[in-house]
Image: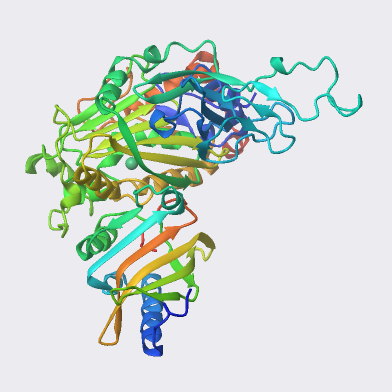
Amino acid sequence: MSAASFEASFGDYFAISQLLSRTVNLLDASRLEEWVDCFADDGRYYVLSRENYERKLPLKLFQCDNKNMMHDRVLSLRQANVVNIHRDQHVTGLPQLAKNADGTFRADSGYALYTTDQGGISQLFGVGAYMDTIRIESGQALFVERNVIVDTFSIPNMLSTPI
Amino acid sequence: METQTISWPAKDLSRIPFAMYHSPEVYAQEQERIFRGPTWNYLGLEAELPSAGDFITTVIGDTPILVSRDEQGKVHALVNRCKHRGAVLRREACGNAKDHSCIYHQWRYSLAGQLESVPFQRGMKGEGGMPADFDKSKIHLDELKVEVYKGIIFATFSAQAEPLLDYLDAPVVYEIDRLFAKKIKVLGYQRQRIFGNWKLYNDNVRDPNHGGLLHMFHATFGLYRLSQVGGAKLDRKHRHNITFNQLGTDDAEANAGYSDTKKVFQSEYQLRDTAMLQNKKEFADPVTLVILSVFPGVVFQQIANSLCTRQIRTRGLNEMELYWTYFGYEDDDQAMTDHRLLQANLCGPGGYISMEDGEAVEIVHKASFTAQDQHAIVEVGGKGEIRDSGNLISEMPVRGFWSYYCELMGIEPGSAEMAKQAAAQTPLQKAAA
Ligand SMILES: [Fe+2]
């Protein structure tokens, strides 16, 4: 990354770090309704396989073009879908930041996601990368767009909760 | 042989022995008699390899397959294994090449699978290399018989296989003609790794009854309910299945069937963004859901405007991968492509209405392991003769799958010999008696 592209203040860096950690902590605590609040009003959320991403194929695993679609994912998980009973644990890497021309930040980070079953047995669900566009307004960072590129794209059992 | 100790008490296949999902001997026989037997196996779509030199790698059962388009445009299905030392020949998922060379010793094959060159065939200065009688013209990658229908590539290992269209039979051909009436374009892939025997997924897709009971998204938001107009159609051998249904054809009275279930039908919940649920009418008929399962390992899907193929890839006795190929039509405008992509949220490993199938297969696989002398009950929709169903409350196509499976495996369900074995007690039962 060029020095010129890196103009984040400590305040910006702090706000972005707080957003990134809050997002996965909310998922791990199954506070999915609050997870939606990590997105700006015009926010978008996509989960896509490394396979499609590298072959420039547009298909996603989750495609939420707006926050209503995120709410619907959560509603369906709560009320309709039957999921494998598990708890999530994300382990995320430090973000690499760059500033976009429109003043938003680009943040790239890695993740590993483990799931633990009711018997206390944990398994790696997958690894991958977050490629985020983040906007900071009055000190608060929110996702404009979160792309989850899934390296472990042969999804074990099912993809139920967001990554 | 292991299969002969497995009991098949019901001639009409209304009882399936759980041991069939767990026996290593059965699994090995399936690879030989089903996947390398007289069946037609889905390999991919022509749209995935449009040009000369294009190739994809896939599997039939556990056998690695290289699908290669030669200079003349002909599609070849080759076992993806070098004839020299048995190494995987093409390691990439897809690509374009002038020939296929093994990385191990650089044996080079044509796009049609013919061995063309071996490095240092004559050695150096009269020493080393291949013997004088080595004839590379006699060495060709193992090649399967290919038939392409409507851009779908099928192959068989067996010279005894009937012609593809006879194998598919009229009801299936009708659905393929409908779904592949226009040239398609691939939108992407999804993969779902399921820890269960491959036949459990075949059972799953031949069981329309579970659609409105397990996949609660359907029922909750009204997309697919057992009370809607639909049914199941079979080919003459009952090995394939077409489950179909029409949106919005149920009423309050029909929904009363859900009265003794919890959580299944909940009219009070509504999605905030219903764009995904819209069906943009594109077929002449009113059918909005088709799940077409072709023996032994592929499903063709229309769910509203979401179209895909699902290939069942075996990964040993206890694991399988579902390989989903999503497509639209070449003449789709951007709005239609966007709609198909949005609607892809409905299926796949994260699909609103399909994510549960992985879990269903896994919990059956897990618990049936310790019940290998017991049998699954397959009676929904009736016993006896296997026939088409006029509604979705049926699992009769499951019996159809097993009837052809048994034919290929040489199993005679309900025969006197088998019945005798069924009556024989296990040591544990004897001890209990
Ligand atoms: Fe299902």
Percent of width and height locating residue A110: 48, 68
Q: Judge from the rendering whether residue B93 lies leftward or rightward of residue B190; answer left or right.
A: right
**In this view, B193 is above or below B389:** below
Percent of width and height locating residue B409: 53, 20
* View quadrant of ligand 1: top left
Q: Judge from the rendering whether residue A25 lies leftward or rightward of residue B424; answer left or right.
A: left
Q: Judge from the rendering whether residue A29 lies leftward or rightward of residue A102; answer left or right.
A: right
Residue at 19% in and 35% down:
B288
Residue B259 visible? The answer is: no
**In this view, A95 is above or below B371:** below
- Numbered disc total: 0
Percent of width and height locating residue B379: 33, 29
Q: Quadrant of residue B62?
A: top right
Q: Nearer the viewer, residue A107 or A101?
A: A101
Q: Nearer the viewer, residue B324 or B70?
A: B70
Residue B16 visible? The answer is: yes
Residue at 22% in and 62% down:
A66
Residue at 47% in and 80% down:
A3
Location of the C terminus of chain A by quadrant is bottom left
Q: Nearer the viewer, residue A101 or B338?
A: A101
**In this view, A157 is above or below B129:** below
Q: Quadrant of residue B369?
A: top right
| Color scheme of the displayed model | rainbow
Q: Judge from the rendering whether residue B5 lies leftward or rightward of residue B297; answer left or right.
A: right
Percent of width and height locating residue B57: 53, 35
